[in-house]
Image: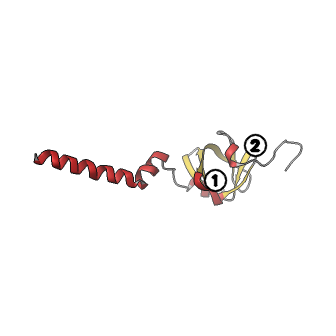
Amino acid sequence: MSEDTGEHAISYKVLRRGTAVLDVHGIEVGSVRRVREIAREHLLDGIDIDTPDGTRFVDAPEVGRITNLAVTLTIDATEVAALPAPESAMAQRVKMSTTVRRARRFGDSLRERWDRR
């Protein structure tokens, strides 16, 4: 922590969109787009970052330090470029939702009953 720059550690909960993201060597690789949280457990899940190659998802173990000025990762720029693109939150919910499967089956059964009448 440097007193001259005013940089200090912060929680992921107050991390702002647009904050610089640095690799392990201090080279800027992008900026914060979105913070993902496991809400039930109050844990950081990861960060979506905007890079020149597109949006990438950085998993929580690769996030080394979060300050008011930058997020420092534990990986280098080549590893950041190889990271996967994030899935949308809605796509994750729909894919994992048992409610969606149940609703489809219910709709199918209603359609079958309607056709048999």
Quadrant holding the C terminus:
top left
Seen from the viewer's position, the closer of residues 3 and 39 is 39
The percent position of residue 44, horizontal first and vertical second, equals: 63, 54
Q: How many marks?
A: 2
The residue at which mark 2 appears reads as 69
Characterize the local packing of mark 1: few (<14), some (14-19) or many (20 or more) Cα atoms within 10 angstroms: few
The percent position of residue 103, horizontal first and vertical second, equals: 32, 49
The percent position of residue 75, horizontal first and vertical second, equals: 66, 59
Q: Secondary structure at mark 2?
A: loop
Seen from the viewer's position, the closer of residues 27 and 85 is 85
Q: Are marks 1 and 2 in contact (CB under 8 Å)?
A: no
The residue at which mark 1 appears reads as 42
Q: Secondary structure at mark 1?
A: loop
> Which residue is painted at 41% across and 50% down in the image?
94
**Which mark, by number, is residue 72?**
none
Residue 52, quarter of the rendered image: top right
Q: Is residue 104 left or right of residue 94?
A: left
